[in-house]
Image: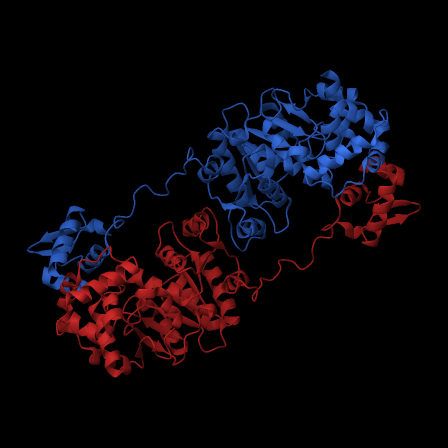
Chain colours: A red, B blue
Amino acid sequence: MHNERLARAALSRLMEPQDSAGLALVQVAGALDALGIATGQLSYGPALEQELTGVLAEHSSTASWAGLGAALKRWAPRVPDLAPERDLATMQRLGGQLIIPGDDLWPDQLGDLGIHEPICLWWRGVEQELPAAAKSIALVGSRDSTSYGAAVTGDLAYALAQRGFTVVSGGAYGIDAHAHRAALAGSSESMPTIAVMAGGVDRFYPSGNEDLLRAVANQGAVLAEVPPGSAPTRYRFLQRNRLIAALASVTVVVEARWRSGALNTAHHAESLGRAVGAVPGSVHSANSAGCHRLLRDGGAICVTDAGEVAELAAPSGDFLPDPRDGSSAVHDGLTLEDLILLDALPLRSTSSVEKLCTVAGLGPEAVRAGLGRLGLLGLAESRNGGWKRSKNAG
Amino acid sequence: MHNERLARAALSRLMEPQDSAGLALVQVAGALDALGIATGQLSYGPALEQELTGVLAEHSSTASWAGLGAALKRWAPRVPDLAPERDLATMQRLGGQLIIPGDDLWPDQLGDLGIHEPICLWWRGVEQELPAAAKSIALVGSRDSTSYGAAVTGDLAYALAQRGFTVVSGGAYGIDAHAHRAALAGSSESMPTIAVMAGGVDRFYPSGNEDLLRAVANQGAVLAEVPPGSAPTRYRFLQRNRLIAALASVTVVVEARWRSGALNTAHHAESLGRAVGAVPGSVHSANSAGCHRLLRDGGAICVTDAGEVAELAAPSGDFLPDPRDGSSAVHDGLTLEDLILLDALPLRSTSSVEKLCTVAGLGPEAVRAGLGRLGLLGLAESRNGGWKRSKNAG
């Protein structure tokens, strides 16, 4: 088990996230032999190559597959830099650790990624299992958020944390930071929020969020699949997004431009069969254009408050949104004839049954019966032999 | 034909809009005999009653059907007030007219209402056929619109009129008024906008919109199914909404509260199989809550500009929305490996192929091939034997 951990630590430095050939090799040969083969210390035969092709075909991942030889060439330049013991020591010094599939702390929902489940996770945070997907909600959006986006994110994250949800985000400026901050403020539980980083967790990046991410690590978790010292490249940002989507049952895009990394996270969530929510905003705001795009493309559901987001996490009805206004309109449920009659009733003076027949276009029997029903509902009252509308009839 | 016209004029006063029994009677017996029966001048046998039951059952409209006798009692109080010649004279004095099914001016799309097609329409406007549904778009919303709703309605109506669409609305304060006004301003064609009224068209109601509605009548049309002198009751507002929905191929709700008559129009449109659009807005605005409700309930499509609305009217692609930004991002279409390589290229200094192999985690052949591709795309350039990212690579 110790060797398995070391091997996975080394593999995570050798291979970029979602390196299909590498992930297939780990699946087929196991982490230890995969490392041996990837570093050229173990030889392999055509049978392995064939098996890898089969696994990749099964996951429709043969597009970039050019044989194991090509993959070995890709990994070779990094082999001299491997020092997994040093990486693990670095994590220990920072109070962190490495977790691998099968560990108690490993979040099972990452298994939904199939072959693209990460090899390991570098972890700084409280030693506590991550919540299941059903209790996790991803809030993502632009770095250059508006005051509207900040306010909505704050409201959502705070209220979701108060309902016992864990808020997952990416630790960036803007929407991400507002989400982490409000979740920390709103939660009385021990895992209010998780930040999934694109670069190594030895550094809290970006530096302007250093204090915030330290607080996330103290009360929640800061995770990455790349080892300490890794730079947060654009490619790694895009791959990181799949982890955010996979950890949560719902991904909500609060604000996003027409082109935005947050949309990439939403697409990952969709392809995992997770629910996607989008917060609407002004059609004049470029920062809501991406949200509206998601709503138009049909994949996302319009969410306007924490209740509606929670409902997506538990569509069984466990978290029904609060009804918008408790009192239904007083006219709900009236028959058409009674509604016509109500319209015909004067508010100030009174009217005879005969007059009501003419105004409402109803027969005398219908008018009398209708007046009786409206009277019982408190919508009509008789006065001096005539009828008028009650004050509370609106 | 003259008698048919007079009979329908009379029937429209006798019967409230969407009086199923009355409409079935007109369908079975024709307008002339229907009027005779409804006024008690013609007798009828059980065969007619049976036929009516059949017609109503066919249209699932038996809910309020209590036999023709009950209907006659409902109509009887209004019989003494019938004076269709006077009503027609009133319309003529106002420069208006009565149109009935089969007239050249009759909008065929109202036939989609089936048995609930109106008996006639009282018309003030230019003598010109109404456009087909495909060229008509309904813009509806709250009376108490916000400045946001006013701005969006103005933009939509103006741009739709400029594209040759006719804007249909209800002549009320708020969104309706903004829609009519902007359509009048935006159109160079002869039928920019149509107002469908809940009360008689002898009065331009509400009085604050009198000038506006006069302008609509001068350049477009002001219509109602109820005769001159009819009050705009709540019931008639709800029935009127089905005409707005039926006249247009698309109903767009720009702003609406959680409970709003505009949602009623949207539901009419849905049940007619017409497209429904909803304009998103701030989640903090009660005036957008009804729009978000429509988006959540799944029936409405998120629309943010006139192009997207036009697309709903012509889903065949005749009116494609303008692409949000013409230039696609420069990285679109790059393979994952090339994207990784691009990330690895320094912006200021240069890097050797060997170094790039380590940083990018790619083999030397892949790096050389990738640099060639990025160079061709203008994303990478070689300098002094090394490679750097081009300035336009973003």
Q: Position of residue B180 (x, y in %)?
A: 57, 33
Residue located at (19% from left, 60% from top) = B344
| Quadrant hosting residue A262 | bottom left
| Quadrant hosting residue A24 | bottom left
Q: Nearer the viewer, residue B124 or A77?
A: A77
Q: Is residue B375 above or below residue B222?
A: below
Judged from this view, the residue extending furthest toward the right is A384
| Quadrant hosting residue B172 | top right
Q: Position of residue A126 (x, y in %)?
A: 39, 80
Judged from this view, the residue extending furthest toward the top is B2
Q: Is residue B52 above or below residue B261?
A: above
Residue located at (21% from left, 49% from top) = B392
Q: Is residue B21 above or below residue A379?
A: above
Q: In this view of the protein, can residue A8 be seen by the observer?
A: yes
Q: Position of residue B349 (x, y in %)?
A: 13, 59
Q: Nearer the viewer, residue B308 or B104?
A: B104
Q: Position of residue B168 (x, y in %)?
A: 58, 33
